Each structure stands twice: as C-alpha cells, then as structure tokens.
Amino acid sequence: MADTSSQSVAHDRTLDRDCTTLSRHVLQELQSFSMEAQDLSAIMNRIALAAKLISRRMSRAGLVEGALGFTGNVNVQGESVKKMDVYANDVFISVFKQSGLVCRLASEEMEKPYYIPENCPIGRYTLLYDPIDGSSNIDVNLNLGSIFSIRKQEGNDIDGEARDLLQNGRKQIAAGYILYGPSTMLVYSIGTGVHSFVLDPSLGEFILSSANIQVPEHGPVYSTNEGNFWQWEESIRDYIRYVHRHEGYTARYSGALVGDFHRILFQGGVFLYPGTLRKPEGKLRLLYESAPLAFLMEQAGGAASTGDAEILDVLPEKLHSRAPLIIGSKEDVALVKSFIQDRARESREGLQIAR
Ligand code: AHG
Ligand code: MN
Ligand code: MN
C-alpha cells in the first residue's frame, strides 16, 4: 500500500519550496515590514521582471529580428555595442520608470547616470548595473549574465554628477546577478547571506533553490584569459606557472564573468582579471561588475582583491573606473596574492627569489 504520509510530506516540501518566491524571501530576510524593507523587496521584484524580459528575448534570439549582432555604435568603454546590450539596458530603465523606487540608474552602456526625477521624492536609491555581461557570447548562444548593485543616494545630487556614487563597495545595500544559462537564475544578497533562485517558466516566478550559499575554502578551478599571459606582470605569471606545475587545478573560462563567478561560488576556486600591458587597471568595472560580485563573495565567505587591496575598500575615481579583480575561495585568492607580495618584496629589497 502506498505510504500516504510520506507522500504528503514530500508534497508539503515541494509546495513550501514553490512558495518561497524572491519577494517573499527578501521580506523574510529583512524580518521587517519597514518602508526600507518594502522598498528593497519591490526593487528586487522589478529586477526580477527585467530578468524575465531579457531571458524571454534571449531564448528566441535566433528567431526574432534585431536581437543578435552589433548596433554599429561604440560605448563609453570603447567597446562595440550589441543590440542585446541596448535592449537589456532599456529594459532596466523601463521597469523602474514610475516605480517610485529608483532615482538614478548607472550602467556600463551609459556615459552618465539616467535620472528618473519623478521617483525621487520617495525612492532615493540608485541602481548600478551591467545589463549584459559577456556580450561576446550572445551570437553563439552561450551563457550570459546581468549584474546589479543598489546604493542609497546620499545628498541631493544637484549638479547631476552623481559624485556620491564614488564611494567604496561597502556602501552597497544589495547586490546580485542574473545568469542566463540552461535555466535562468538570480543570485542576490542584502547583507544576510547569498541566496539563489531559479526561474520557473511555468509559474513566471523565481523560486528559492539554495539559501546561505558558502563558497568552499579552496577549489580546483582557476578562471582567467591565459591569452593575456604575455601582457601580465611577472607575479601573475608565477601563479599561472604554479597551477600548471601542480596537480589538482583545472582551467575554466567562459568569457562571461557571471558564469565563471557562479561556478566558483558553488564549487570553489579563483577568477582573475589582472591588469595587462594594454589595460593596467584590468578590464572589469568596479561599480557595476567587481564591487557587486565582491559583496556576494564576501557574504559567501570568500574574498575579492585587486592584489593590493580588498575590492570593497577601493574608491572609484569615476563612474566607469576599472580595477584588477582576483575573486573566489579564500585560500585561492590568498595564494594569488602571495605571488604578488613575493614579487613586490623582491623588487623592494632588490632580491632574486629562486623559482
Ligand atoms: P561585458 O560583456 O559586460 O563587457 O563584460 C565582458 C567581461 C566579462 O564578462 C568577461 O569575464 C571578460 O570581459 C572577458 O574578457 P576577455 O575577452 O578579455 O577575456
Ligand atoms: Mn561585464
Ligand atoms: Mn556588459
């Protein structure tokens, strides 16, 4: 005879899981119905809506007009803009219009912040975002992401220069990313751990899949573009030579930071985008790429560094400032840093360390 009690327990568990939607989770995490809690929950809901819209367009990108390819323009970063970059950038703006939630949006694709003055009397928040991360993957149907960060506006920003954004990453009140892979996932933190959600297309809801994610102390993966080896400082080459010569390391690099970060968050290891000859500050932008991911990684028990300083302590000089990024498991980040420190000591003391 069928065991009806165990069946109903399994049923309850599935139901409980299906009911843990993103908005409910945010309110649970904040343990409050204060104005700020309501605001944050509403902001996360809007981000989730943006994620669903972008995900929907991507899932049919090869079939609809105007989804793939370049626009022919170059953005403020000097990078060729893809049609999907523009679409995703506009989606985030649209979902926050008339929301009363976000005064300003600052994105990789816009030279200056976008202001929504009608929201400002109520929602004094700023959304910083990378609408599509890993744009080079779009046309070949590989994983992509979006990255977001939320800060509270400080002061009135009368001159429209958004100078209050030029503060360190510890000023973030929430951060996260969306991963467009075999399923669409949203991973976020509001400073109470890192939590992941899977988009259930049949419900149109993001449902909790893992709560309080902790990154392993060490992992096998190193993730970097080794094509830049010739452009790196000797310390980074030392690290790469080390992993080449020791058992237990494996390389994974997808060309989209969000995907590479996601793997490391769950399985451990380290992602590196160091400075290069051509770009001494590296490629990744502090305010809407490195800082939000550093916020998540610290919340998950990992580390994020430029090699010299913690990413969350770095002060951006401008909206689109870049910084070298070394992020992942504590032990692996420490190992990379040890090679950087060895070379620095060597040059300070005029030493020649035998390798
Ligand atoms: P974006 O598409 O937002 O410009 O970001 C691309 C970034 C990041 O996703 C990835 O890790 C890195 O660029 C890849 O750069 P390389 O092609 O130089 O390896
Ligand atoms: Mn990016
Ligand atoms: Mn981008």
Image (cartoon, rainbow, N blue to C red):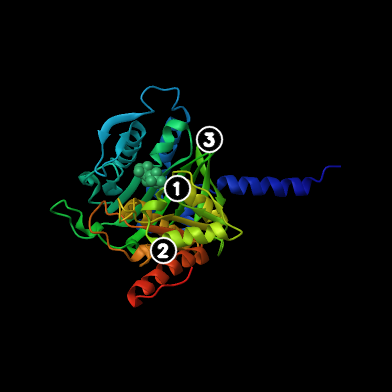
Separation (CA) of disc 1 from disc 3: 21 Å
User: Which structural element holds mark 1?
Assistant: helix
* Disc 3 target residue: 201
- Note whether ligand 1 is within 8 Å of mark 1: yes
Q: Is residue 339 above or below residue 254?
A: below
* Disc 2 target residue: 235
Q: Is residue 165 left or right of residue 55?
A: left
Q: Amino acid at mark 3?
A: Pro
User: Which structural element holds mark 2?
Assistant: helix
**Tag nearer the camera, 2 or 3:** 2
User: Which structural element holds mark 3?
Assistant: loop
**Tag nearer the camera, 2 or 1:** 2
Residue drawn at x 41%, y 22% as measured from the top left: 64
Graded by Cα atoms within 10 Å as few (under 14), some (14 to 19) or many (20 or more), the crowding at tag 2 reads some
Q: Amino acid at mark 1?
A: Val
In the drawing, what numbered circle is on residue 258? Answer: 1
Q: Are marks 1 and 3 in contact (CB under 8 Å)?
A: no
Tell me which label, 2 or 3, sits earlier in the chain.
3
Q: What x and y, as percent, mark residue 121?
A: 22, 51
Is residue 33 visible in the rendered image? The answer is no
Q: What x and y, as percent, mark residue 334?
A: 47, 67
